[in-house]
């Protein structure tokens, strides 16, 4: 058999004295409640003495004691229609005086700054969201004619013979116009498609070819080609056109 040690005594809830005070005043005659509440008011108005340390408790006593006084008045007057009217009038006057008293007691205390002081809502609404925008300036294409031969930035020459482009590695390209443009580092080679609106892009860093019909070279930015459908539409990076990330 296991023996259990008795549980330690539970503490009373901290909120319990306030409703107990209200019920006590509601059960007492109103002519006893009124002097008790007036004593709390005088203790708050008395600026010197040991009672100032209990100012918070005195305020709670007034806040919870006033409803108890009103219930005692209602019980004393018989709880008829006239008693309810007089009690409501007393409640209006009593709570108004209580608010005035607390405002007068707090007149010298510094007020806490409002949370809106850190930034008014119009400023917060107009504040930019997300990363700062970057200004992209495209370098316009510089088309080079392929008469017979053209130096390749990666080494060797490009040769144009019999409507065919021969690259420095020996491979041949057909169906392109005799002009081209390179990226700054020479990785990308752009050639317009012959007889149609389109572009042939060679990603020589990865050994890939892209025939893009309906696109034209709008310019270069950070070594990447930017393409557009026409002059009225916004250019797009090659990664957006191909639908995947083409960066290393």
Image (tube, rainbow, N blue to C red):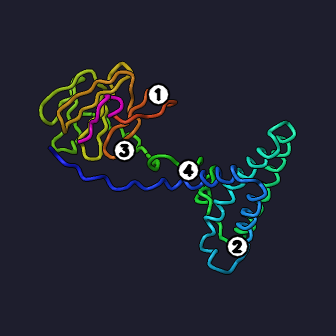
Q: Mark 1 packing: few (<14 Cα in 10 Å), some, or many (20+)? A: few
Image marks 1 and 4: residues in contact by CB distance under 8 Å: no
Q: Secondary structure at mark 3?
A: strand
Residue 77 located within the stretch drawn in magenta? no
Q: Can you give x and y, in whole percent of width and height, for residue 164 in the image?
A: 22, 25
Is 17 situated left or right of 27 in this image?
left
- Front residue of 154/163: it is 154
Q: Distance of mark 3 from mark 2, alpha carbons?
A: 64 Å
Specify the segment rendered in magenta: 239-248
Tell which tag, 3 or 2, sits nearer the viewer. 2
Q: Can you give x and y, in whole percent of width and height, for residue 136 in the image?
A: 43, 46
Q: Earlier in the sequence, mark 3 or mark 2?
A: 2
Residue on which disc 2 sits = 108
Q: Residue shown at 73%/68% (left/top)?
A: 39
Q: Earlier in the sequence, mark 4 or mark 2?
A: 2
Is 123 situated left or right of 231 in this image?
right
Is 176 situated left or right of 170 in this image?
right
Residue on which disc 1 sits = 230
Does any portion of residue 113 appear in the rendered image? yes
Q: Secondary structure at mark 4?
A: loop
Residue 127, disc: 4
Residue on which disc 3 sits = 221
Q: Mark 3 packing: few (<14 Cα in 10 Å), some, or many (20+)? A: some
- Front residue of 63/243: it is 63
Q: Residue shown at 25%/46% (left/top)?
A: 185
Image marks 1 and 2: residues in contact by CB distance under 8 Å: no
């Amino acid at each position: 058999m296991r023996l259990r040690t008795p549980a330690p005594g539970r503490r009373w809830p901290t909120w319990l004295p306030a409703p107990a005070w209200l019920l006590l005043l509601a059960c007492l005659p109103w002519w006893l409640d009124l002097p008790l509440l007036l004593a709390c008011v005088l203790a708050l108005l008395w600026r010197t003495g040991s009672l100032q340390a209990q100012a918070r408790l005195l305020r709670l006593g007034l806040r919870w004691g006033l409803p108890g006084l009103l219930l005692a008045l209602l019980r004393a007057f018989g709880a008829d229609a006239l008693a309810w009217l007089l009690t409501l009038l007393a409640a209006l006057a009593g709570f108004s005086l209580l608010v005035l008293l607390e405002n007068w007691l707090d007149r010298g205390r510094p007020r806490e700054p409002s949370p809106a002081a850190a930034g008014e809502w119009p400023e917060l609404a107009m504040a930019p969201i997300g990363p700062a925008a970057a200004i992209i300036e495209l370098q316009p294409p510089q088309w080079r004619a392929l008469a017979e031969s053209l130096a390749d930035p990666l080494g060797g020459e490009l040769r144009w013979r019999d409507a065919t482009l021969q690259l420095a590695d020996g491979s041949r390209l057909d169906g392109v116009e005799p002009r081209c443009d390179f990226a700054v580092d020479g990785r990308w080679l752009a050639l317009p498609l012959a007889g149609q609106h389109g572009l042939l892009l060679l990603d020589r860093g990865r050994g890939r070819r892209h025939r893009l019909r309906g696109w034209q070279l709008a310019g270069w930015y950070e070594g990447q080609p930017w393409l557009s459908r026409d002059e009225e539409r916004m250019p797009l990076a090659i990664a957006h056109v191909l639908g995947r990330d083409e960066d290393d």
